[in-house]
Image (tube, helix red, strand yellow):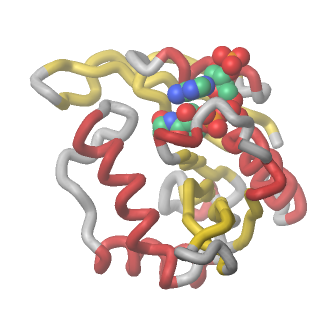
Amino acid sequence: MSLNSFSFRPPVTEDLPALADIFNHEITTSTRTFRAHPVDLANRQAWLEDIQKEQYPCLVIVHSREGGTNGESQLFNIVGWCNLSRYRTQEAYNATAEISLYIHQNFRGLGLGSQIFELILAEARIRGYRTILAMVAMENTLNARFWEKHGFQQRGILRDVGMKFDRWLDIGVYQLMV
Ligand SMILES: CC(C)(COP(=O)(O)OP(=O)(O)OC[C@H]1O[C@@H](n2cnc3c(N)ncnc32)[C@H](O)[C@@H]1OP(=O)(O)O)[C@@H](O)C(=O)NCCC(=O)NCCS
């Protein structure tokens, strides 16, 4: 799959069904997110409005490919997203952000997560964030490896803070100084 067929842009309302599908796959099949119930479009709309209102860095990945029965049109799919969000409500945390990054399961290991992360990091620098946190459910060892590869350092492990699929789960706190 050529990386030339992927591009990055801020999300729009039309992207929300695809973004909900990617998220819901992880919610229902994995511990990568601690959410227990699938999100609906109203939930994603509220998420998008919050991102736009607060101007958090956020990009989606668009995959374009030839399509249509006669092959003349281009089809566009959303295959992932990355955003920063507020870590805690108090003003003292204004320059701290938490990161979310999700790539569709059929498009992992292609370098897309790394590319979109670098774009979000560049945006974080422009906007003056001081530090980014990634909260990683520790049984997903590949995820921890991804953040470490991108310069994040583990600051500690919170034991048994989550319960999903009838098991206690640890969270690793990973930090990058922007
Ligand atoms: C973690 C994730 C964002 C990485 O994106 P990606 O596009 O697959 O990553 P890249 O191709 O840029 O980089 C590959 C590296 O990511 C890591 N990785 C994590 N999950 C992976 C997967 N399923 N397949 C391949 N690599 C994966 C590995 O460290 C790999 O490096 P390696 O090849 O040296 O082992 C992606 O796998 C994903 O969306 N996972 C599910 C959602 C999630 O857990 N998000 C993080 C929430 S904090």
Query: Would you identify the image quadrant in which residue 124 lies?
Result: bottom right
For residue 22, above or below residue 170: below
- Which x, y percent locates residue 133? 61, 39
Could you say which is closer to the camera, residue 91 or residue 80?
A: 80
For residue 76, above or below residue 93: below
The residue lying at 58 percent from left, 84 percent from top is 53
For residue 19, above or below residue 116: below
The residue lying at 50 percent from left, 15 percent from top is 141
Could you say which is closer to the camera, residue 101 or residue 158?
A: 101
Could you say which is closer to the camera, residue 45 or residue 7?
A: 7
Res. 134 visible in picture:
no
- Which x, y percent locates residue 151? 78, 26
For residue 100, above or below residue 176: below
The residue lying at 66 percent from left, 79 percent from top is 73
The residue lying at 28 percent from left, 27 percent from top is 161
- Which x, y percent locates residue 22? 41, 53
Lateral position of residue 1 relative to residue 140, left or right: right
Q: Quadrant of the N terminus?
A: top right
Query: Would you identify the image quadrant in which residue 51 lies?
Result: bottom right
